[in-house]
Image: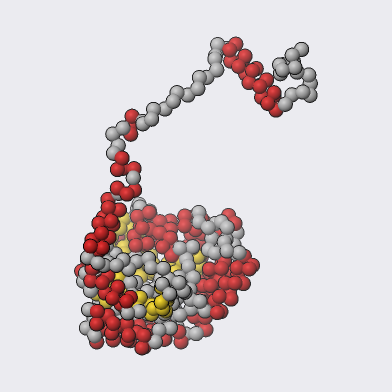
């Protein structure tokens, strides 16, 4: 007996390696008995597949993408004429009425902190309590990992705020629109939107595969005519407008759009990202502003990152709408749930908004002052109605960047909006005002802009 032969090794002497060797030997013997041999090793693949031989290297390198080349060209042009890049500056403090950059304090007009709640001690305490109890992450989709009480409390109070049956919160405001529209509508449907609607709505329509038509900004009569002409060609129809337009600071006539959606049997969606906490006597948004029952709107969308001092988005509406989204919307089903700490921040901010409507009044007064004072200085404020957003239309991207840099040197942070975010002739500075700003601070920024121009 050969102790090295696994076939003759005594019982109990088999190692794992020996067992594997015996199994392989017996398998080879069976294959040979059927006229089969051990499969040869795979041939070495050629260094370059024939199908890729004619593909230019430029097609597999990011630095050669046309969009990147255009970006480099614009940056080089700015450097040649001595224009500093005003974007992606590092801020060393909380986003609010003031900020700190490079160790220097600036008056800040590029923050969504409309009600001055970011960093408020009450909100910080609520975040710390949630952090200690739940940690920093929801860990997975709420469909998979379950829910935390603070997430549901936030949704219940938002539903109550909007007078709807239910609400669902997403981790991203942009993803809220993309997922909601992409989930609810399809190739047999039509989405009609304001010409100045946010990018997230356009991306949602593209994802849905629905047909798309735009109507001129706030032109309800043109929308009515469009629906009169083509409504019968589609199954479901969605109309999308914003509560307060983030680039121009104006609003739609909600009663007109409600009447149109009723007569043409369509759904109406209102993006309240910049309207919550801003419009209406108590900050309840466009419905309160126009004294329209909130149930007249089918889909209320909002974000948590502006008046509510957090991050994320939400949809408020009927129970059937929300349940459908919770089980089928990709941005909810396949995304991690809203962080409990962020949910706690927005929940406490919403409660403070409910308790302190004077913050809304202070914001509205500051917005009206900024818009009116800018006009008195000859600055083109476009369509702004003087709420939280007021543009200074400068008509040139270069002029807007130079004006922004000039203000920054004087201690004011106001970001430019340039082509292609807007048309070149509509390039601007965009002022976001806060309830925490003072009249003197606002006047100082406007005076500095007037001097720079």
Report the label total. Answer: 0
Q: Nearer the viewer, residue 52 or 201?
A: 52
Residue 425 pos. (x, y %):
20, 69
Q: Nearer the viewer, residue 355 or 73?
A: 73
Residue 373, by quadrant, is bottom left
Please state if 41 lies on the left or on the right of 290 as rendered: right
Q: How is the image coloured?
A: secondary structure
Looking at the rendered image, the quarter that the C terminus falls into is bottom left
Whether residue 356 is visible = yes
Q: Nearer the viewer, residue 450 or 436?
A: 450
Please state if 429 lies on the left or on the right of 32 as rendered: left
Residue 408 pos. (x, y %):
33, 75
Residue 184, by quadrant, is bottom left
Whether residue 262 is visible = no
Residue name at image x 21 percent, y 69 percent? 396
Residue 363 pos. (x, y %):
40, 83
Residue name at image x 58 percent, y 74 percent? 126
Residue 277, by quadrant, is bottom left
Residue name at image x 72 percent, y 26 percent? 15
Outermost bottom residue: 440
Looking at the rendered image, the quarter that the N terminus falls into is top right
Residue 251 pos. (x, y %):
32, 76
Q: Nearer the viewer, residue 67 or 176?
A: 67
Residue name at image x 45 percent, y 63 percent? 172
Please state if 270 lies on the left or on the right of 143 as rendered: left
Relative vertical location of residue 13 with respect to residue 349 in this rendering, above or below:
above
């Amino acid at each position: 007996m050969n102790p090295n032969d696994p076939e003759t090794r005594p019982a109990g002497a088999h190692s794992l390696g020996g067992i594997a060797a015996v199994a392989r030997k017996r398998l080879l013997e069976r294959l040979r008995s059927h006229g089969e041999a051990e499969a040869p090793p795979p041939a070495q693949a050629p260094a370059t597949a024939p199908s890729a031989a004619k593909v230019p290297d430029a097609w597999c390198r990011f630095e050669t993408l046309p969009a990147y080349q255009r970006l480099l060209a614009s940056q080089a042009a700015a450097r040649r004429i001595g224009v500093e890049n005003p974007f992606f500056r590092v801020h060393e403090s909380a986003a609010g009425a003031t900020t700190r950059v490079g160790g220097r304090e600036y008056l800040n007009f590029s923050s969504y902190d409309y009600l001055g709640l970011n960093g408020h001690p009450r909100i910080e305490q609520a975040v710390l309590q949630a952090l200690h109890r739940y940690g920093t992450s929801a860990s997975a989709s709420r469909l998979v990992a379950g829910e935390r009480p603070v997430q549901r409390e936030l949704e219940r109070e938002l539903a109550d705020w909007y007078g709807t049956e239910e609400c669902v919160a997403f981790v991203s405001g942009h993803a809220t629109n993309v997922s909601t529209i992409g989930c609810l509508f399809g190739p047999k449907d039509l989405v009609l939107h304001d010409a100045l609607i946010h990018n997230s709505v356009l991306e949602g329509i593209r994802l849905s595969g629905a047909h798309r038509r735009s109507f001129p900004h706030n032109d309800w009569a043109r929308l009515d005519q469009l629906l009169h002409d083509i409504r019968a060609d589609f199954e479901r129809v969605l109309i999308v407008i914003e509560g307060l337009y983030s680039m121009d600071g104006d609003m739609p006539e909600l009663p007109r759009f409600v009447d149109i959606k009723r007569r043409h049997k369509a759904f109406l969606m209102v993006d309240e990202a910049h309207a919550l906490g801003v419009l209406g006597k108590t900050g309840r948004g466009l419905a309160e502003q126009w004294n329209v029952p909130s149930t007249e709107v089918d889909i209320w969308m909002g974000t948590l990152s502006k008046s509510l001092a957090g991050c994320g988005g939400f949809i408020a509406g009927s129970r059937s709408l929300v349940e459908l989204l919770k089980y089928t919307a990709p941005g909810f089903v396949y995304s991690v749930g809203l962080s409990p700490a962020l949910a706690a921040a927005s929940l406490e901010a919403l409660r403070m908004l409910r308790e302190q409507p004077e913050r809304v009044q202070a914001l509205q007064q500051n917005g009206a002052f900024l818009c009116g004072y800018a006009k008195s200085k000859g600055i083109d404020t476009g369509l702004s109605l003087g709420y939280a957003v007021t543009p200074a239309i400068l008509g040139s991207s270069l002029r807007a960047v130079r004006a922004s840099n000039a203000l920054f040197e004087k201690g004011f942070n106001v970001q430019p909006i340039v082509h292609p975010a807007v048309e070149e002739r509509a390039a601007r500075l965009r002022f976001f005002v806060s309830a925490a700003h003072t009249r003197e601070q606002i006047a100082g920024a406007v005076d500095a802009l007037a001097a720079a121009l």
